[in-house]
Image (cartoon, rainbow, N blue to C red):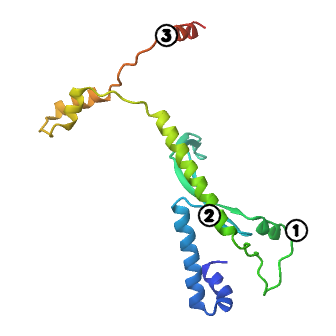
Amino acid sequence: MNKAQLVEAIADKVGGRQQAADAVDAVLDAIVRAVVGGDRVSVTGFGSFEKVERPARYARNPQTGERVRVKKTSVPRFRAGQGFKDLVSGSKKLPRGGEVAVKKAPKGSLQVAAKKAAAKKVTAKKAAAKKAAKKAPAKKVTAKKAAAKKAPAKKVTAKKAAAKKATAKKAPARKTTARKTAKKTTARKR
């Protein structure tokens, strides 16, 4: 069944072909916008749509067999609800033509689900902020470097620009304690 066939199937129940087309477009648009925004869309008895992050990874090219780097990406995911699964598997019978196959959500359940989703989103943001704070070590900036960064831009030759880039990329030396160096040397000996 494609979109046009879906519109035809619900046209009689909605009151016309144009109203059915507008309803289908509105529902699909709302789902897409919510998922792109990072929200989870749950329809009781039918399923849920959500955005899932896939980390960067290595894959294998099936023609050549070589390893290929795959970038980090986000993809939509649909998970069927229990009522939908039961109907498809045959454990429950599909109601006759006039009845609704997917039961309506009980009153107030949509508001509770929205609050839970908002709470999960807030905790996920807090966890991400904590991870970022742990990963990013505080950098010490000397007064000369701070002044150099705030100084107005001057015309620089290509050689000088390349030299500045090379010096900027060098990582500052880290101080290690005697205990850490002792552990490193014993680990190397083993």
Q: Earlier in the sequence, mark 1 or mark 3?
A: 1
Q: Earlier in the sequence, mark 2 or mark 3?
A: 2
- Label 2 crowd bin: few (<14), some (14–19), many (20+), radius 10 Å: some
Who is closer to the viewer here, 86 or 60? 86
- Label 1 crowd bin: few (<14), some (14–19), many (20+), radius 10 Å: few
Q: Locate residue 153: give its quadrant.
A: top left
Q: Please identify the quadrant where the C terminus is shown.
A: top right
Who is closer to the viewer here, 75 or 115? 115
- Residue 123 lies, with reference to residue 110, above or below; the image says above
What numbered label is drawn on residue 181? 3
Q: Which residue is mark 1?
A: 91
Q: Which residue is mark 2?
A: 114
Q: Earlier in the sequence, mark 2 or mark 1?
A: 1
What numbered label is drawn on residue 124? none
Residue type (three-letter) at the residue carrying disc 3? Thr
Q: Please identify the quadrant where the N terminus is shown.
A: bottom right
Q: For numbered disc 2, what is the local secondary structure?
A: helix
- Residue 115 lies, with reference to residue 166, above or below; the image says below
Left or right of residue 154: residue 190 = right
Q: In this figure, what is the number of numbered marks? A: 3
- Residue 143, how many percent across, how many down? 23, 27
The residues bearing labels 2 and 3 have C-alpha atoms spaced at a distance of 53 Å
Q: Locate residue 157: give its quadrant.
A: top left
Q: For numbered disc 1, what is the local secondary structure?
A: loop
Instruction: Work out whether residue 51 can be spotted.
Output: no
- Residue 35, how many percent across, how many down? 56, 63
